[in-house]
Image (tube, grey):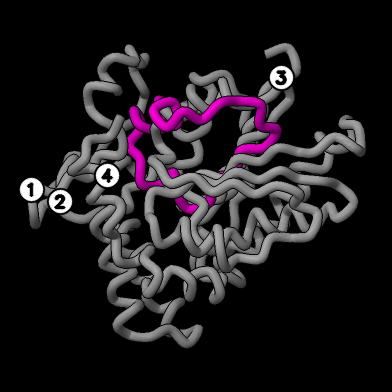
Amino acid sequence: MASLQERRTIRREELFNRSGYYRFLLDSNALLHREATDVATEGLMPMLRERAADKPVRVLDLACGGWPKAIAGVMAAFSSRKFEYTGIDINPDQVKLASGLFEFPANVIGVQILEGNAWDLEAQGVSGGYDLIFSGMNLHHGNPEELLFLARQLRGLLTPGGILFSHDVYRPDAQTYRRRPDANPDDPAESFRLIDAARIASAALPPLEVAEDQARDEPSWREDYLQRMGRTLIARGGDPDGTESTVAHMRQRDFPVSTREMSRILSHAGFSTSVRRFDDSVEPMGPYVACCTAHLGRDE
């Protein structure tokens, strides 16, 4: 279980509070939420064709936030189907917004919003039986060990034939990995860990093949990523102060793995993975955003 200090650190992130700037990121489509909705809708179709039409689809949304628009769009696309939705988020403001103000599609027949750490679901008492686990703009905060720790839990929560869908930021495959610091360099008392180190150690995870960048200088891809985000938000009508705070958050906390590394991590947990990448011909953040669809076989 994450320590009290760690949970407070995550909970107080201003970008995600009620008055934070994250909703503008959604509305501006800077991180391709609309494209992710289309990809996830397409990926869900084969599973639904094999299911009884009257059987509700159970959905778990990790770090759901106060405006879970992408997954809501997926559920709305299948208006003849019934969905049961569970979201989990550690930020109390986001939990209140999703519970009280966000309007889910009419075919969502049950909504449950949990306040807790979406990276350690066992510690939150989340039980299984989900057909679709959705993660939007969450996994890029984790290091490889945290990602595998979570992926193993998610495998146990999915039904046979279930799908894990990740819409997220990913580093270019050709660039080496820059590991996220365990604590804020400007305030060592502030932990960046998402899962308690003792929980990771006790999991006996296998070695992960991730080539890490040991240079002191900022990798060129990372500076390009941050500058693109700032330019995109301003070009779409973003507030300068909100844009600055968003980029500052990303500089401090965004150290994503590549899609190739994510596929290997998910393979360690028993998933087979397909990846949909984007380019910058229309969306400036396209080179850094991808959708990973991970499947469990029906014999799992």
Q: Label 1: which residue?
A: 188
The numbered mark at residue 184 is 2
Magenta residue check for 148:
yes
Can residue 181 be seen by looking at this rendering?
no
The part of the image, by quadrant, that contains residue 232 is bottom left
Q: As drawn, is 57 to the left or to the right of 211?
A: right
Do the residues under discs 2 and 1 have CB atoms within 8 angstroms?
yes
- Name the kind of residue labelled 4 in the image: Arg
* Distance Cα–Cα, label 2 vs label 1: 5 Å
Magenta residue check for 4:
no
Select label 2 or label 4 by which is in front.
4
- Name the kind of residue labelled 1 in the image: Pro
* Distance Cα–Cα, label 4 vs label 3: 34 Å
Q: Quick one: label 1 or label 4, which is nearer the N terminus? A: 4
User: Which residue is at 36% across, 66% downward?
Assistant: 17
On screen, residue 167 above or below 268: below
Q: Quick one: label 2 or label 4, which is nearer the N terminus? A: 4
Q: Label 4: which residue?
A: 7
Secondary structure found at label 4: helix
* Distance Cα–Cα, label 3 vs label 2: 40 Å
* Distance Cα–Cα, label 1 vs label 4: 15 Å
The numbered mark at residue 241 is none
Residue 49: percent from left, percent from top: 89, 36
On screen, residue 293 above or below 280: above
Q: Quick one: label 3 or label 2, which is nearer the N terminus? A: 2
Q: Label 3: which residue?
A: 297
Which residue range is magenta in the image? 121-149
